[in-house]
Image (cartoon, grey):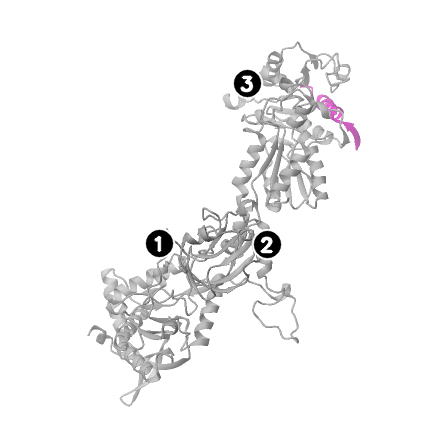
Amino acid sequence: MPIPVEMPKMSDTMEEGVLVAWLAEEGDAVSSGDIIAQVETDKATMDLEVYDDGVLLKKVIPEGAAVPIGGLIAVLGKAGEDISGLLAGYDGAAGVPAEAPAAETVAPDTPAPSTGDGAVQPTAPEVVSGTASAGNDGRIKSSPLARSLAKEHGIALHQIAGSGPEGRIVKRDIEAAIRKHAPAPGVAPGYPVPGTMIEMPAEDVSETVRISQMRKTIARRLSESKFTSPHFYLTVDVDVEQAVAARARINKQAEAAGGVKISFNDLVTKACALALRAHPAVNASWIEQEGVIRQHGHAHVAVAVAIDDGLVTPVIRHADRKGLTQIATETRELAQRARDRTLQPEDWEGSTFTTSNLGMYGVEEFTAIINPPNACILAIGAIRDEAVVKEGAVVPGKRMKLTLSSDHRVVDGAVAAAFIGTVRSYLEEPLSMLL
Amino acid sequence: MAALQLREAIRAAMVEEMERDAGVFLIGEEVAEYNGAYKVSEGMLDRFGADRVLDTPISESGFAGLGVGAAMAGLRPIVEFMTFNFSFVAFDQLINNAAKIRYMSGGQFSMPIVFRGPNGAAGQLAATHNTAVESLYSYFPGLKVVAPSNPDDAKGLLKSAIRDDDPVIFLESESMYGLKGDVSDAEDYLIPLGKARIAREGADVTIVAHQKSYWRAMEAADGLAEAGYDAEVIDPRTIRPLDIETIAASVKKTNRLVVVDESNPFASFSSEVACQIQERVFDWLDAPVMRVTAKDVPAPYAKNLIEYYMPRTEEIVAAAKKVLYAN
């Protein structure tokens, strides 16, 4: 019987995988645990392991092709075995099982899961989810110890081939995976080591921490953003005296009525959403593979939230159409769920713009890395009490710096300047947001 | 240290306790005039006289009940069964009286009694004379069950059992009575009940085994060492109260457990250990707990079958290799 190798579900949000490279040739003998190809998912490039012994009879998919989950990638079996029956059971080159509906493909106007600016999907390591197609019943067999070790070391079980009975993943399989990924002793992961570097004994001064899945994603996505999209930065100093006063009045009323208080950040979210409406060129994405820049029909503003060992960017949808109280309520709830790690993909997918606020840490101004596929990100600084000149006199004033990072492929300097100017005018005249 | 046979170590414990406490006495079939069916009580009649070393008729229910009454009256009887197979005749005295009097009297009576004698199979004795009873008696709350594997433990544990205020089932072994071993000659040598002994330290797999099975486990550990596996052997010594902490700590280290038990497999000591271990250290287990027990039939008579019936060294090695995922 020929054995089909199908596209496994390698992450919770994965819908399809791109076969990046074949690592085995047709006619090669392979055994359980061998890596025959590399597959890129929405999260990372992962090794595709086989769980059976045999000969690689056919590479069904060419390099570079995308295959939905469950789609046929390759066929294993005995040399010379007839595989036409098996191939007939799958539908064409896409390799989807004929009897099963094709996995829903990503709608073209839906941005890829928004994981830029370090934000990642806050799932726990996929240890017991049982979503990978390891066995016939789709369940990953593993010993209790293997599961707890995998969790401790942030290893996803579906990436490991089990060596126990019926493919059970056992302690030695996890240990092998840990050895494979272990950093060189005494050297912080990822650092280039010049020949002249004096090696410090790790046990004296260093703490070696495994790179978590979240940090890996942060590293990959932010490098990708920073190194492929040409960033430029515009900083404005905003007079927020009226906005501060307006917020105080609103919150005083909210307090009296037992309602929700709004934060200054909520005002900025609202101002950005309205400004995106006024400047659709900023509310856009560079989509290289389609050869287009897409201006989005909605203003979905993501807000960066710091959590343990990383950050996420939940999205306030249609923020231009929502009142401040609703924005405040949703932001509070999303931030709490982000810290509880209970956000769902729909909570962080689909942003068209992102803000990042370090004002509460007293940071006066900073530059943020764009959260792909957004074109811009706004870095919000602290509100400062300053001596300002008004009508020829030095008086006490309140100021806040905003820095817009823009992807020059999508947005030019004048466009970005016009956008941030609108944001500024909304914040300087908060009543104008009602117009 | 003196090298004593198991029977001599048991005798030494009884003699020391009878000299220490005038309330201790020995009663059973052939314990006095005949010097014991297996010569465990040899010389004790001469030493203590017929008031304290008492022969009985073949009437287990009668003399076990006499012992229960004597214990309620404040004495410390040692009741010898010629084998524990015969204790079934006295089951009501053991289970309904000895085990439950303290509870049912609201603590007004204690039950400082020891029932002792050979346990388990001893060759071609057929179905009714080859029963291992530790799983059975440890089932009942109120009874303590002790099953030593060597003379030193036997002496220290029996002395503790005689001084214990609760009924203790003290299991010996007919085929081990001649087993020699160094026995502590420390004055008042007591080994507390409920403490396991790590007989052999190892890192790869834990084997729990008591009495005769303990010696099979030690052989298996040697065999495993030749194959490159480092087995830890734990002798629980006391079946109840069970020192599950020592076993659990070992399993946390080795991640694997094989329990060897001469009982039949259903609802046995080995199933109890397996259950408690998965409850306590599930996340440390790298393989299912394996058991090696007597086969699930009455003990056969034929030589080849009784040998097959008993837990064997090669079965222990095979079980250990299975949990080690070794081929």
The chain letter for the residue carrying disc 1 is A
Magenta: main secondary structure: helix
Q: Nearer the viewer, residue A75 or B41?
A: A75
Q: For residue B211: magenta?
A: no
Vertical position of residue A30 compared to residue B230: above or below: below
Q: Quickly name the residue at label 1.
A: A101
Q: Quickly name the residue at label 3.
A: B97
- Secondary structure of the residue carrying numbered label 2: helix
Same chain for mark 2 and mark 3? The answer is no
- Magenta residue span: B1-24
Q: Label 2 is placed on what type of residue?
A: Glu
Q: Quickly name the residue at label 2.
A: A175
The chain letter for the residue carrying disc 2 is A
The residues bearing labels 2 and 3 have C-alpha atoms spaced at a distance of: 55 Å
Q: Quadrant of residue A305?
A: bottom left
- Nearer to us of marks 2 and 1 is 1
Q: Label 3 is placed on what type of residue?
A: Asn
The chain letter for the residue carrying disc 3 is B
**Quadrant in which the N terminus of chain B is drawn:** top right
- Nearer to us of marks 3 and 1 is 1
Vertical position of residue B143 compared to residue A289: above or below: above
Of the numbered discs 2 and 1, the one sitting upstream in the chain is: 1
Same chain for mark 3 and mark 1? The answer is no
The residues bearing labels 2 and 1 have C-alpha atoms spaced at a distance of: 38 Å
Return the mark for residue A206: none
**Quadrant in which the C terminus of chain B is drawn:** top right
